[in-house]
Image: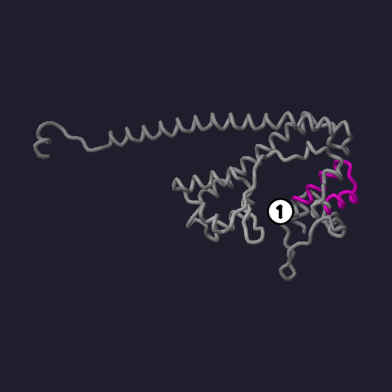
Amino acid sequence: MADLAKEAGITVRTLRFYRERKLIPAPRREGRIAWYNEHHLARLRTIGALLERGHTLGGIGELLAAFESGRDVGELLGLDATILTPWSEETPVRLTPEELADHFSDDVTPENLTTSLDMGYLAVDGDEFVHISRRLLDASTELVDKGIPLAAVLESARKVRVHADALALLFCNLIRTHLLADVLHRAPTDQDVDRMAEIIDTFRPLTKGVVEAELAMAMDRRVRTEIEEWLRACDGGREAGPKTEGPEAAADGD
């Protein structure tokens, strides 16, 4: 508990109070040890952010209960649907175990399934799997077909997600710092919601365009560098090869 409170920037007393109000879930217990994880920390940071925006603990409790029961949190917050519309345009795909095996063949191992479930790429719904994204499923399938092990694809995907999260934080910091600094310290008004919706509508295509352009140029630079390094290595290998000197060496070779 002390470690969690320190990481969240609050006192242990405050943490106990939140627990008593059932604002955070109970920890996992092993004997006398209570284990907290990143989900508890994320919940505490959410509570802190909502408090900074003017919400009461009672209101926060209602919001968190709504979230956990699947109710519309945006409606409770009074936020326009435009703000809460997902930025992604991914289409989930339902797969039987046999269809999943058709995509990845022998790479459908318990380890890879566990990794996919942990990352949220796969979910279980009855007797079927649900993949979060048709585009990611197709890309993974093609990479495996080309000869890259699924475990390597998943590990690369994990690293891509880290960078994607960093990019999302960068863009959100731009919006929060330069466009909404005067709004985020209080509960939003109708005018604030309209303004947020306009900003988000502007940033949706901008963020995607910037990332796509920068990634394309980065790949151009990386491919050129890889080819140059490969050619230098080939030239170095030829220079370091065996040398013959004069007709005597040729005669010895004969």
Frontmost residue, 60 versus 86: 86
Instruction: Examine the image and state in which quarter residue 32 appears.
Output: bottom right
Up-down: is 40 above or below 220? below
Position of the C terminus by quadrant:
top left
Q: In percent of the image, x 85 and y 44: which residue is there?
A: 75
- Relative to 81, 118 lies left or right: left
Give the main secondary structure, helix, strand or loop, of the magenta stretch.
helix
Instruction: Examine the image and state in which quarter residue 99 appears.
Output: bottom right
Identity of the amino acid at label 1? Answer: Glu
Frontmost residue, 45 versus 76: 76
* Magenta-drawn segment: 42-65
Q: In percent of the image, x 78 and y 51: which residue is there?
A: 43
**Count of all numbered marks drawn on residues in the image:** 1
- Relative to 54, 129 lies left or right: left
Question: Could you tell me residue 108's position as x and y percent?
Answer: 52, 57
Position of the N terminus by quadrant:
bottom right
Frontmost residue, 14 versus 231: 231
Up-down: is 3 above or below 157? below
Residue 64 included in the magenta stretch of the image: yes
Element at badge 1?
helix
Q: In percent of the image, x 83 and y 52: which residue is there?
A: 66
Question: Could you tell me residue 238's position as x and y percent?
Answer: 28, 34
